[in-house]
Amino acid sequence: MSVERIEIVGRVHKLGDHVNTDLIIPATYLVTSDPIELGEHLLEGLDPDYPKRIHEGDILLAGVNFGSGSSREHAALAIKGKGVSCVIASSFARIFFRNAINTGLPIIECPEAYEGISDGALISVDLEKGIIRNTETGETFRAQPYPDFMREIVSSGGLVEFVRKRIEKQMD
Amino acid sequence: MSESRKILSEITGREKLKPGEFIEADVSLILANDVTAPLAIKEFEKLGARELFDPDKVVFVLDHFTPNRDIASAEQCAIVRKFARERGMKHFYEGGQAGIEHVILPELGLVKPRSLIIGADSHTCTYGALGAFSTGMGSTDIAAAMATGKTWLKVPDAMRIELRGSFGGWVGGKDLILHVISRIGVDGASYLSMEFTGDGLESLSVDGRLTVANMVVEAGAKNGIFPVDRITREYLKSVGVESSTFTIEPDPYGYVSELTVDLSMLEPQVALPPLPSNAVPVSKAPKVKLDQVVIGSCTNGRIEDLRTAAEILKNKKVAASLRLIIIPGSPSVYKEALREGLIDIFLDAGSIISPPTCGPCLGGHMGVLASGERALSTTNRNFVGRMGHARSEVYLCNPAVAAASALTGTITDPGEII
């Protein structure tokens, strides 16, 4: 199975522990499933100014239990819709983890990166090797990379696209 | 094997399931609501699927932003309604047929012990109270199951919670689960199955068990599971479900962790903002001034909860400084409350009665908080901004503490005023 090599480079927004889905996208906005519209309110629960501070390609770096709470897939969609390129966390809550993979949002678990990287740092993430590098200090952190099929789901853009691609391949 | 593994083993027909193993399993019931079903439908259609694997095994309940709050929420409901009608879905509930999803599914006899239920709502874990393996997932997982009737799961490890003794006055399921979460933390049961056993189960009614199982997700658990005993079987019979008894035997291979709770030592609990794990005994809770009290939700919107509240509110008046909102969880809870005279008691006390809805629990509608306001609520989450403005606060408690506090205007131990 071939997986395209993804290396992500972006500016870090450092968040705390237990960033739940109500903080990621408050429930009042759950009357659409459009990622762009949802993205306009990303992390508004944490700070009303957050949506203005996050730019295309930025990386979220969070502590433990990121995405806890509600099962709303809108949380992963809001992060994608805002153009966030990757979420690194010390740990992810169970439902959010599935939702991120299913919607094609690159995520990686690395408590050491959370300890060692400061807010605003410019970092690179190699999802295939599980290597996170602070481009300013050169410091690197190792995470457990996901198996090929999971990375292929993410690089396809989510579970639905992944399944469709497979069906098309079978038909060829 | 732990009880959850036993159930998954029965469902998959595989004898020895190990924790951490990935399995594919047939699902018995699939649930979504007006927030998650529109997205599930969109993904279902993107998959190229046309028909549901079984239109009688998919349940849609319009309960979050209903009766519709605004045009956008009405449009979401319209998407779900159209899809359900076109596919001839038997279990589509809205309007006067609908209540809060996790309150009505057991009432309708749709929850069967030993079955696998998945739902696009994190509180789908509620059905573990009746011995089902049930867990919340996102809309895409639900869409895939709607098309295939299958889902993939990682077999969970288990945590055992042994209950001893019986509850004192004004203490119940809500206090038990808040206490457990305060001991293990909001990620203390991440990916685990929480198994509830012990002689203390005798003092926990089905309504109380539903409250406990409902909140296992607030500790990060995948599911919660109760045995099917005499109490469960009587309840199931009343909703037309016949079941055998299923006891939970200790797993000889042990548990990831074990916890014992002496129910007789428990005081009513209050979880301070902004996490359910911030629970303290009511006697140690700060005497903050309240702007709103909410009694309802998939956690505490059942008849037993309303009876408790009525016992305290009878012939009393709600403090003029706050709003008390009472939300019967389903039309049948509402009707029973009316029949027993509870609604009269609530109205005489000066409460607002809301139609069955998730409403204020998620800051949706029917009681959203302004900046700086504080609510005491029988709901399940006290996260920042959960009930409205990011600078509002939510405290969690049981229906007795909520009712007593609605009378005094500050967080109050019901034992002090009754």
Image (tube, coloured by chain):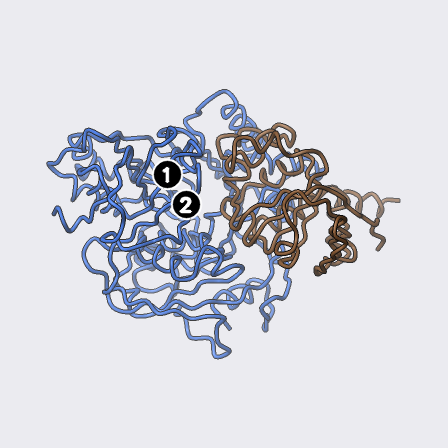
User: Marks 1 and 2, Cα distance to the nearest angstrom?
Assistant: 8 Å
Residue situated furthest top in the rendering: B71
User: Quick check: B7 above or below B175?
Assistant: below
Q: Residue furthest right?
A: A172
Decide: is A115 above or below B315: below
Q: Amino acid at mark 1?
A: Glu
Which residue is rendered at x = 60% and y = 31% of the image?
A51
Q: How many tags in the picture?
A: 2
Q: Secondary structure at mark 2?
A: loop
Q: Position of residue B324 (x, y in %)?
A: 25, 33
Residue B301 image-quadrant placement: top left
Would residue B388 appear left or right of B376 to someone viewing this image?
right
Residue beneath the point at 69% across and 39% down: A58
Residue that numbered label 2 is attached to: B274
Verify CB contact (< 8 Å) between mark 1 and mark 2.
yes
Along the viewing direction, whichever of A8 and B123 lies nearer the viewer: A8
The quadrant in which residue B373 appears is top left
**For this view, does B103 lie left or right of residue B188?**
left
Residue located 40% across and 57% down the image: B181
Mark carried by residue A63: none
Q: Which quarter of the rendering shows the C terminus of chain A?
A: top right
Label 2 lies in what chain? B
The spot of residue B175 in percent (x, y) is 30, 55
- Of residues B20 and B16, the one drawn nearer to the viewer in this rendering: B20
Q: Colour of chain A?
A: brown
